[in-house]
Image (cartoon, rainbow, N blue to C red):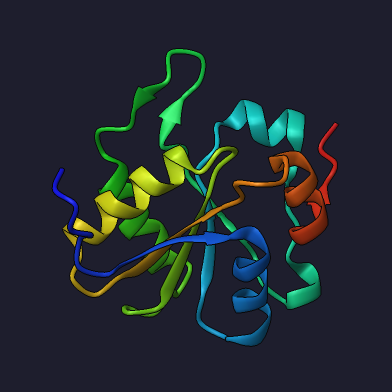
Amino acid sequence: MSGQSPVGYAGDILAVDAYALLSTEKSPTLIDFRTQAEWVYVGTPDLRALDKTPLFLEWQTYPSMQLDGQFAVHLESMLESAGVERGASLLFLCRSGARSRAAAIAICARSQSARCASATESRISHRLTFAVTLPVSDNR
């Protein structure tokens, strides 16, 4: 891929900034692209304090880590079902930022109306950041 960002891809943002955006604006939606195993064993974002509900869609399926070939179709359907407006900011989350960045780029390349960002944290461990900035419900 060239050094040029796809149209609509806003780039990587820190988890703290993603949470601030979710808490101060009505339309942004958080989409968790981790695997079902991660949701079960690590937990899921708890946005009840913001009166929001995250969406969940695997980018890759554990344990094979096979990419979902129908990912964009599934996401578009999920966004429509959730009533997310076209043009709303989409915040993509995964453990390291790699899957969420790839997913954000893929969906922005497909849809000129989406504004996407990948939530990441490069200096602090993901678990700590995730727990501090996005409250986690314990699924264990």
**Quarter of the image where the N terminus is located:** top left
Identify which residue, 113 or 56, lies in the foreground: 113
* Left or right: 115 as drawn, with respect to 12: left
- In the rendered structure, the answer to whether residue 122 lies left or right of residue 46 reads left
Which residue corresponds to the image point at 45% horizontal and 46% vertical from the top-left? 100
Q: Is residue 127 above or below residue 53?
A: above
Image height of 119 relative to 123, above or below: below
Who's the residue at 75% across and 34% down the image?
42
Residue shown at the point (47%, 44%) measured from the top left: 57
- In x, y percent, where is residue 68? 32, 32
Outermost residue toward the bottom? 25
| Name of the residue lying farthest toward the left | 2
From the viewer's perspective, is 53 left or right of 100? right
Quadrant hosting residue 54: bottom right
Q: How many numbered discs, if any?
A: 0
Measured from the top left, where is residue 73 in percent x and y?
Answer: 26, 50
Q: Give the x, y percent position of residue 51.
A: 72, 77
Front residue (pair 26, 12): 12
Where residue 60 sits, quadrant-wise, is top left
Q: In the depicted view, which residue is nearer to us: 68 or 124? A: 124
Observer-nearest residue: 82 or 3? Answer: 3
Q: In this view, does 48 lie above or below 40?
A: below
Q: In this view, does 25 lie to the left or right of 8?
A: right
Residue 28 x %, y %: 51, 75
Image quadrant holding the C terminus, namely: top right
